[in-house]
Image (spheres, rainbow, N blue to C red):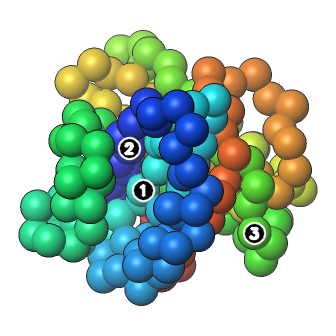
Amino acid sequence: MYAMQYEIDLPTGYDIEHRVATRGHRTDAFPGLGLKAYLVRDNQYAPFYLWTDTAGMSQFLWGGGGFDGIVQDFGRPPVQHWTGASCLPGPARATSPNFATKRVRPLPSSGGIERELAELAQQSQNPAVHTTALAIDPRRWEAVRFTLWTASPDEDTDVRYRVLHISQPNLDQLS
């Protein structure tokens, strides 16, 4: 599993909801895509992806599979990416999520991943969780926890988003 996200500061008055409503379906059956959450906050578009393999991610980014529309309309933003450690379903998996959170924490050199995995497993039991995933940035030794929620989360987190659409063609293949 691989996680990926880019952030685009939107021009004033840009209707991102219309863009997602008219284009979001294009990833609903994208090969290699486990999940794409079309996320917004303030005046920023910040979709988050979970890929089952790098072939799908590569096709999307430079193979004419979708990212070319972003580049054409907004320029080429930097793409953050992480190696996946775990992805767990929550009790609300059958319900469309409305919110998402992302938490980034430094990993201590000893026991950090095990602690993060235990916290992820605990969080996956929350009745409002659709999906929660943990990914690692081994360049910075940071853990990124991404969670989709059906109700407004009350957890302490770094970033909160609103979900406009979710594509999940291979969600069950994420681990």
Which amino acid, mark 1?
Tyr
Which amino acid, mark 3?
Ser
Label tally: 3
**Residue 129 visible in the shown view:** no
Residue at image location 41% in from the left, 79% down from the top: 26
Any mark on residue 80, and which?
Answer: none
Q: Position of residue 116 (x, y in %)?
A: 56, 33
Indicate the secondary structure of the residue bearing disc 1. strand
Indicate the secondary structure of the residue bearing disc 3. loop
Which amino acid, mark 2?
Gln
Q: Identify the residue under disc 2.
A: 5
Determine the CA span between mark 2 and mark 1: 6 Å
Q: Earlier in the sequence, mark 3 or mark 2?
A: 2
Any mark on residue 49, and which?
Answer: 1
Any mark on residue 96, and which?
Answer: 3
Q: Earlier in the sequence, mark 1 or mark 3?
A: 1
